[in-house]
Amino acid sequence: MGISKTTTYWVIALVILIAKPACGAQHVVGGSQGWDQSTDYDTWAKSQTFKVGDTLVFKYTTGLHSVVELGSESEYNKCDISNAANSFNGGNNVVKLDKVGTKYYACGTSGHCSSGMKLKVNVVAANSSPSSSSSSSSPSSSSTSTPSSSSSSSASRAFTLVNKFSYSASLVALVLLLSFSF
């Protein structure tokens, strides 16, 4: 006699709940408005907690807007897109936040960045709580922050590996459970 279908469904639901945090959050930039000129991105970003492993989704009208990843705060402040670290123009771009630090994005269409279509994202370690993200949201330019940011990155990588392991272990448990129940 196998495991009941009800038990199987409960276990599947539990596995999904356990695995979901390991995947990271998805942030649609600008919320329901998407990546457009009418959104206040400073306010939107302050209402979010961006963690390592999360993704940014830029949804916009192709040909009207684009996304340019900037390499520095200076480029962000000046809307200098001439040295873009990365650029996208597909209308539905997904960017994975893979390390702790500050990321800068702007629209590549002439005049849009200077009218406010730019985004500054402070990425915190995956195991940070929202309250701790506000304390680490402004990076220090002093050389003394290098060791802590380096150990913070190592901790993030370790946590990401643990999350990937947890997700894999959950999937294995699900497969084993399903194989015994049918």
Image (tube, helix red, strand yellow):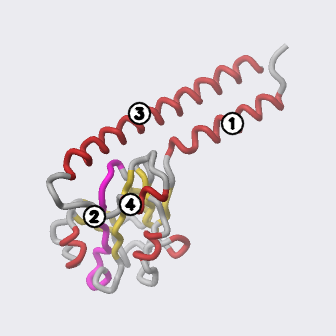
Between the residue at mark 2 and the residue at mark 3, the CA separation in whole angstroms equals: 26 Å
- Tag 4 or tag 1, which sits nearer the N-term? 1
Which of pointers 1 and 2 indicates the residue nearer the eye? 1
Q: Which residue is mark 3?
A: 161
| Vertical relation: 120 (above or below) 20 | below
User: Where in the figure is residue 82, as x and y percent of width and height?
Assistant: 16, 71
**Residue 150 appears at what percent x and percent y?**
24, 44
The residue depicted at 70 percent of the width and 22 percent of the height is 177
Q: Nearer the viewer, residue 40 or 110?
A: 40
User: In the image, what residue type sits under mark 2?
Assistant: Glu
Give the structural element (helix, strand or loop) at label 4: helix
Residue at horizontal 62 percent and vertical 24 percent from the top: 173
**Disc 1 residue type (three-letter):** Leu
Circles 3 and 4: CB distance less than 8 Å? Answer: no
Q: Residue at x 77, y 34 (%)?
A: 9
Q: Is residue 160 left or right of residue 71?
A: right
- SS state under label 3: helix
Q: Of discs 2 and 4, which sits in the foreground?
A: 4
Please name the residue that numbered disc 4 is placed on.
135
Identify the residue shown where x is 84% and y is 24%.
Answer: 4
* Distance of label 1 from label 3 (alpha carbons): 21 Å
> Was residue 103 drawn as part of the magenta stretch in this picture?
yes
